[in-house]
Amino acid sequence: MATKEILYTDFPDLKLFRRGKVRDVYEVENCLLVVSTDRISAFDVILPNAIPNKGAVLNKISVFWFDFTKDIIPNHLITADVDKYPQSLRKYKDTLVNRSMLVKKTAPISFECVVRGYLAGSGEKEYKKTQSICGIKLPAGLKESDKLPEPIFTPATKEAVGHDINISNSYMEEKLGAKTSNFIKEASLAIYKKCASFAETKDILIADTKFEFGFDNDKIILIDEVLTPDSSRFWPKAQFKPGSPQASYDKQFVRDYLESIKWDKNPPAPELPQDVIKKTEAKYKEALKVLAGIKL
């Protein structure tokens, strides 16, 4: 399935609720319409190029995981079938098909719920300095990309601008209260463990990921996206070799390119070469095919 590239959506008769780094969200009756575009961000800056089919990959892989994890916790997905959308959206079917979902409107909990199974990214940098991540002490002598003894929950603030900031569990508990804090921690770890075990049967290691939760009335549910190449590090198991960065199915490939050209990580972001765009598209599509059995 080929799809046209969509960097931004424009539905004049719909109320724009929020435009994120990747998703355009609209209010539709009492629900939200979430449209995954082909935008890509790196180091919290939106890049000028589209990655073809990226929005469809993000949408379909989230729908797959929402179904896979619904026995652990309910989620905000109502439907991703455009033919079941309200009549007012049918005229936009060509744009919405494959890259959108209708979801419940919730009161989001303003923390990123990060789970790490391996030592990578900002966690690895923090470990080098303190032998801990977010206040969690780890064994001495771990190498970059090493598997951790147990997955750990390392929350972060959700910043509207700039980088999210790693925080301790106790800080989150102080802000949210023990009951809510413990609930989302346990849910995050349970989701990660179930999905990481499944992914490993498909020869993919989920190094780390982040979840978001919201209140649906007085009930906490899973929202946003789940275990996509945008929110997770996916490593091919066959190439796994601790002690250095890993090959990946996610946007680390784009980050590595931007690091190689010594971009200062301030906007405007540089244009991506065509070969980087094509390889990134291929990585996203491969992740969807391997994990969910869906070929674009």
Image: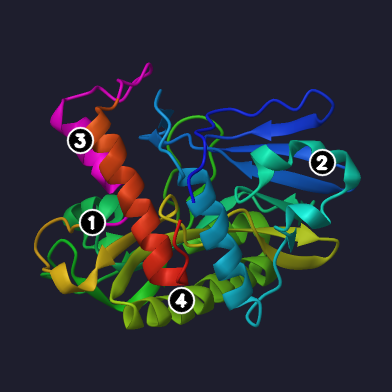
Q: Find residue 89 and name its label.
A: 2
Q: Which of 200 and 137 is in front in this view?
A: 200
Q: Find residue 195 and name its label.
A: 4
**Horizontal placement of 112 versus 249: left or right?**
right
Q: Residue at x 32, y 62 (%)?
A: 234
* Separation of marks 3 and 4 at Cα, in angstroms: 29 Å
Spot occupied by residue 272 in the image (x, y as percentages of width and height): 28, 27
Query: How many neighbours does mark 4 have within 10 angstroms: few (below 14), some (14-19), or many (20 or more)?
Result: some
* Separation of marks 2 and 3 at Cα, in angstroms: 38 Å
Amino acid, disc 1: Glu
- Residue bearing the label numbered 1: 124
**Which residue appears farthest toward the top when viewing the image?**
268
Quadrant assignment, res 51: top left
Q: Find residue 31 and name its label.
A: none
| 211 in magenta | no
Eyeballing the image, is 228 above or below 241? above
Q: What element carries label 1?
A: helix
Q: Residue at x 18, y 70 (%)?
A: 146
Q: What element carries label 4?
A: helix
Asked if residue 231 can be seen in this view, the reply is yes
The residues colored magenta run 248-271
Quadrant assignment, res 130: bottom left
